[in-house]
Amino acid sequence: MVSGLGDRVRAARTRKHMTQERLATLAELSPITLSKIERSKGIPSLDIIVRIAVVLGESPNDLLGWIPVDASDAAKRRALLINDLASASERSSDEYVSALIRLLRTK
């Protein structure tokens, strides 16, 4: 089971002042299924996680505890270079722009 999923579902449900029965009905689940999920006794399908998330107004990623991964250092470097390239027109240096383009092409 995804660690902490049940706790996150329960916390989101209680923040919305919703009973298990109400959430189960709106997510088209049996109350027993939702209870098992909240007690970490069952492994829900992705479809069920998405339905619960939609009803609760949460992101499935948040319920699953997934943390977005930062872009790689190379991608960050390219983003910074793109910003530099955008401001290069102010510098009017063809050599500077050419150097930035070469750097952008490197991986």
Image (cartoon, helix red, strand yellow):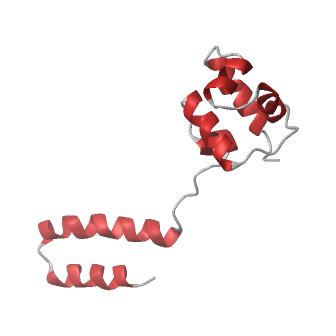
Give residue 55's quadrant in the image: top right
View extreme (top): residue? 17
- In the image, taking residue 59 as reference, residue 99 lies left or right, namely left
| Near-viewer residue (87 or 47) | 47
| Near-viewer residue (66 or 44) | 44
Residue 25, image x, y percentages: 66, 24
Q: Is residue 95 above or below residue 53?
A: below
View extreme (right): residue? 41
Residue depicted at x 24% and y 70%: 85
Q: Is residue 9 above or below residue 77?
A: above
Residue 75, image x, y percentages: 46, 69
Residue depicted at x 62% and y 40%: 62
Give residue 32's quadrant in the image: top right
- In the image, taking residue 92 as reference, residue 29 lies left or right, namely right
Residue depicted at x 80% and y 44%: 3
Give residue 38's quadrant in the image: top right
Residue 1, image x, y percentages: 82, 47
| Near-viewer residue (97 or 53) | 53
Q: What count of labels does the image hold?
A: 0
Residue 20, image x, y percentages: 73, 21
Residue depicted at x 13% and y 66%: 90
- In the image, taking residue 93 as reference, residue 105 lies left or right, namely right
- In the image, taking residue 30 as reference, residue 39 lies left or right, namely right
